[in-house]
Image (tube, rainbow, N blue to C red):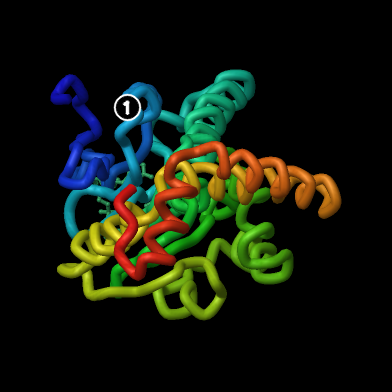
Amino acid sequence: MDQFENILLEKMDGNIYCLTINRPKVLNALNQQTLMEMDAALQQVADDSSARVLLVTGSGEKAFVAGADISQMQNLTPLQAKKFGETALAVFRRFETLDVPVIALVNGFALGGGCELALSCDFILASENAKLGQPEVCLGVTPGFGGSQRLPRIVGRAMAMEMLVTGRMVDANEALQRGLVNHVYPQAELLEQGLKLAAKICNNGPVAVKLTKELVQRGQDLDLENACAMESDLFGLSFACDEQSEGMQAFLEKRQANF
Ligand code: HXC
């Protein structure tokens, strides 16, 4: 898996994948090529039926991703800018529709497109030095990679509006208080903690985990009645899998399930 220039994709123990945005000289800014490589990497993970969790992080100790690449965006025409935004939106959507949980390990600045990337992951672990923000208005543009829509859904409209119209960065502790990130760790422990969490997920029934992600992702855009009806369907479907009999049998026999 060394065909990429701007990212690294590694398959680790326990069928856990780690995707690292690897342009540390520009704080892992996202240019067109990086987005295309991320898309190809996501396809590889999607094609691997043994994949259980995807971790996403940035190279170096300073940044997760400091945004879309401003030097590449500077001279775009309106139509090119629209297309650039649409490309990233499609790639980010793939994190949400990937069948396994995706955890962002935000190891520093997550700004603009970087914050939007983290928001597209299922949840976020942050290092103590993390700073998240949507500073697009400081550059005279709106968010373009989904931030104006995903941020209010996660932190609520008022907090999202404040972040979006001031461009203020929030530090890891404030992000934790606001429910933007799940946990904060010293930077040196972030990957280890991410792997620990991934390993916990891997102890569970893999199909049940995938169906649960699908319920949460698809359900949030449905009304409650239809969303709950979908839950009944997938709950029923989970009884068609061997892991349901093994999971329940193991409980009754007071042993660890072997999924
Ligand atoms: C291109 C970037 C970059 C970016 C940093 N760099 N962010 N290059 N695009 N988004 C480059 C710098 O130019 C510099 O290159 C090197 O990375 C190190 O950055 P410094 O600024 O020297 O570091 P520091 O002083 O520590 O400041 C860190 C920072 C700052 C606060 C994160 O770099 C910053 O404000 N970056 C931009 C953040 C931002 O506005 N992001 C949103 C982008 S818009 P040299 O060559 O000088 O070493 C966006 C919109 C998405 O994401 C939607 C579009 C459709």
Binning the other alpha carbons within 10 Å of mark 1 as few (below 14), some (14 to 19) or many (20 upward) gives few
Q: Report the side of 256 relative to 135 (left or right).
A: left
Q: The N terminus is located in which quarter?
A: top left
Residue 41 placement (x, y as % from top left): 32, 27
Q: Is mark 1 within 8 Å of ligand 1?
A: no
Q: Secondary structure at mark 1?
A: loop
Report the residue at 35% width, 74% height from top: 184
Badge count: 1
Residue 62 placement (x, y as % from top left): 23, 59
Residue 243 placement (x, y as % from top left): 43, 45
Instruction: Indicate the amino acid at tag 1.
Output: Asp
Q: Report the side of 139 relative to 103 (left or right).
A: right
Camera sees residue 43: yes
Report the residue at 42% width, 74% height from top: 171
Which image quadrant for residue 12?
Answer: top left
Report the residue at 38% width, 55% height from top: 204
Residue denoted by label 1? 48
Report the residue at 25% width, 66% height from top: 193
Camera sees residue 20: no
Residue 257 placement (x, y as % from top left): 34, 57
Viewer-nearest residue: 195 or 40: 195
